Image: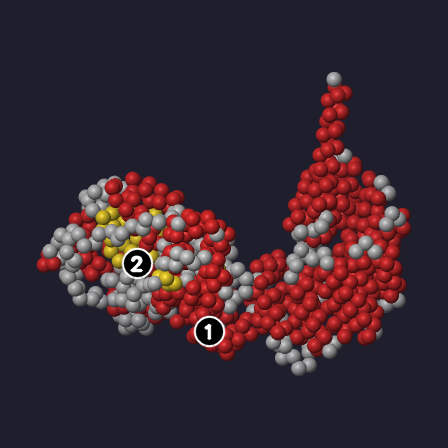
Amino acid sequence: MRDGTPLTGDFGRRLRHLRTRAGLSQEALSHAAGVSVRALADMERGRTRGPQRRTVQVLAEALGLDDAEAADLEKSAAVGRPRPRTATGPAAPGTLALPRDIKDFTARGPALAALLELAQDTGPDRPGVSVVTGQPGLGKTAFAVHAAHRLAPHFPDGQFALDLHGMDPEPTTPRDALARLLGALGIADAAIPAGTDDRAGLWRSMTGDRRMLLLLDNAVDESQVGPLLPGAGPALTIVTSRHSLAGLESVHRTDLALLRREEAVELLTRIIGPERVRAEAQAARDLADLCGHLPLAVRIAGQRLLSRPHERLGKLVARLAAEGRRLDGLQAGSLRVRAAFALSYRQLPADTRTFLRRAALAAGADFSPETGALLAGLPYDDAVACAEELTDAGLLQSDAAAERYRFHDLLRLYAAEQVAIEDGTEIRDAALDRTTRWMLRRATAAALHFDVEHEGSPPGGAHDGDPEPHGDPDPDGAPAGREEARAWLEAERAQWLAALRRAHETGRHQQVLDTAQAMHWFSDINQHWEQWVEVFQRSAESARLLGSRRDEAIHLNYLAWSYNMCVHDPHNALTSADAALAAARDCGDGLQEGWALGYGAGALHRQGLVPQAQARLRAAADCLASQKSAQARLAELTILNSLGTLLRQAGQPVEALETHRRSERICRAGIPGRTDELIALYHAVARQQIGNDLAALERWSEAEPPLRQALAAFETAQMPAWAGPARLDLGHVLSALGHPEARVTLLAARDDLTGMRSPRQAEAAAALEALSASSALSASEETADAR
């Protein structure tokens, strides 16, 4: 024993002890040794029991070990290294010929060109190595074989291909692979050395001056490939693997991507012939889409159609359109998409298999490790390691900028199948419920960063009979501040919305109400999100099922707002507002009655019913003026601003200005119990409308300052849904003044409003056209005057 750890064996425990003794985190040791964090984690957890000698050496140097300790560490690694299998004897010379090329090979032009350039760059001191990686079904072997045939004339000293059986339970060992390669070069069985290192040395010496091409197909890892690579000379080696083989240094990489749609249709055309594709062009495109543009899937579909020359493409499209039958439909003879995925799936450790299949339950196009951890029931760090392992294995694609991952559509279907087979309904539902509870607690806490009325208590208070805890489920990892909260809510939009659906469908109605209530102010900032209609439909229904008429009135009002502002549907907005009005009157809630009248007025105005809208707004103002609460004062401000706007649009700008000045006076007086930040927002709205009233009276110079003040306030509060319209209003005034900032202001407004799908984007475009026409006319007049 030395410092409490064994001299040999249990490499992972010894490495972890030495790292801890040195005071290094995995990240720090990774940086010092040049070994990935995932590889270190695998070593310490015992997943990698016998790393390569070179890896052990760099770890020993980074840990500052003396010679004796380094030797001990190497001994413990050697114990875990796989023993070579007994050789079955080398193949006869020439038996490692390239497989047959595929005549209908399609696309991959840039990748082929890059390989040709690499082949031309090889020389006596520059052996080339290209690693071809990608997810199952991308056609890595087909690409490598096709490339090898194309490149064969450049390598007159021979072309050899060896399948390393990386997906088999026992992949080919380097020792056995070297025996086959040496045999292919004509070395007699008796002359082949016994040890792997000696065989590798003989292989390198024999290939040092040969211009030869070597295809190593289906590699499992770097330790399998490393001894097979020529050390010098003008050789080119093409390695294919489902794993990234990131540990191979100084190599050219070909990361195959999915085919483009037109390339997938071209492949289908080459298989079944142009006549059938021309006859059903749209069905051919639909078929390519249903295959996810995955070469293996397109080939299988094509081979199936080729074997049935009278079958219409549309028939296969109809069959594959049903997700539950798609993988069954994608098989032709021995070619099966499901089998290709299963090969990789079976190679994964148990936790990683769990992570992969449960991740298929995530909502949306991509997911975070956080979501994967919840669904799989794994610690976050383990989930990150699983996600990276799956990325390296080509089973997930990682986002280029964020820590998020996505499936290929067909692989997601396969993973979902495994959930049904291996987990069953009970475990699946438990995973979804666990994720739902966590996601809604995080979403509620994140949304409250934007609730300027929030006093620090849970949105719904303490609820009798509701055991759900409040607050963020992971305070240490919670978003800090508005920017992080906004980023999380936007990135996880699909996930927390799916959680809200599940909570509603499984009867967790109080949690639905709490989350929707917390989202109230955040929804104002993101009015262009159409899903607010669903959020408030579900919360209003949950309130009804809980028997709370007051909550029903609140959430029906939110629903009326979302119909008005998010999807521009005044008919449903009016229906919801009328239902909110009835609920508010039933429970005697004057505040919600005032809001319902106001939202109904907005819907009537959008339907062109201006007198009726004005009447409702006046009734709303009277109702709210009789209420004493601070919330009623805020509601009154909103109603007054809306009434003034309607008066201005009805050709009554003087009365509109008077109404908005009244709103501004309330803001200046302040509202007890409400923050300056909140009052500043309402004051900004009043200033915006005062600026518009002055513009309607053609008092342009007076209109500019309040509009600039309003825009600045909205930008400071990070409320783009409010800043966009204010910028457009300012642009109109600047145009009328002939201000040099007019054009850039209108351009920015148009872009903002277009991004939010606001109906006012057309108004911004028209203002820009008018400004351009005016500028052109002025230039023409100046030219005429100059003449």
Instruction: Single out the residue that lies furthest toward the bottom.
Output: 465
Q: How many numbered callouts?
A: 2
Residue 164 locus on image (x, y percent): 27, 59
Residue pictured at 11% horizontal, 56% vertical: 188
Residue 304 as seen in the image, left or right of residue 66: right
Residue 636, image x and y in percent? 83, 61
Is residue 524 depicted above or below 458 in this figure? Answer: above
Q: Quadrant of residue 522?
A: bottom right
Question: Where, quadrant-wise, is the N terminus in this rendering?
Answer: bottom left
Circle 2: residue type: Ala
* Above/below status of 481 relative to 507: above
Give the label on residue 219, or none: 2
Mark 1 secondary-structure assignment: helix
Q: As drawn, is 433 to the left or to the right of 157?
A: right
Q: Which residue is mark 1?
A: 420
Q: Is any part of residue 422 visible from this angle?
A: yes
Residue at 29% of width from left, 56% of height from top?
A: 217
Query: Which is more N-terminal, label 2 or label 1?
Result: 2
In the foreground, 566 or 590: 566
Q: Relative to residue 111, is residue 678 depicted above or below? A: below
**53 or 70, which lies in front?**
53
Between disc 1 and disc 2, the foreground one is 1
Q: Which sits in the foreground, 497 or 716?
A: 497
Amino acid type at circle 1 is Ala
Residue 772 occupies which quadrant of the picture? top right
On the picture, is 30 further left or further right than 236? right
Judge from the rendering whether residue 750 lies leftward or rightward of residue 493; answer left or right: right
Rendering coords of residue 712 (x, y %): 72, 48
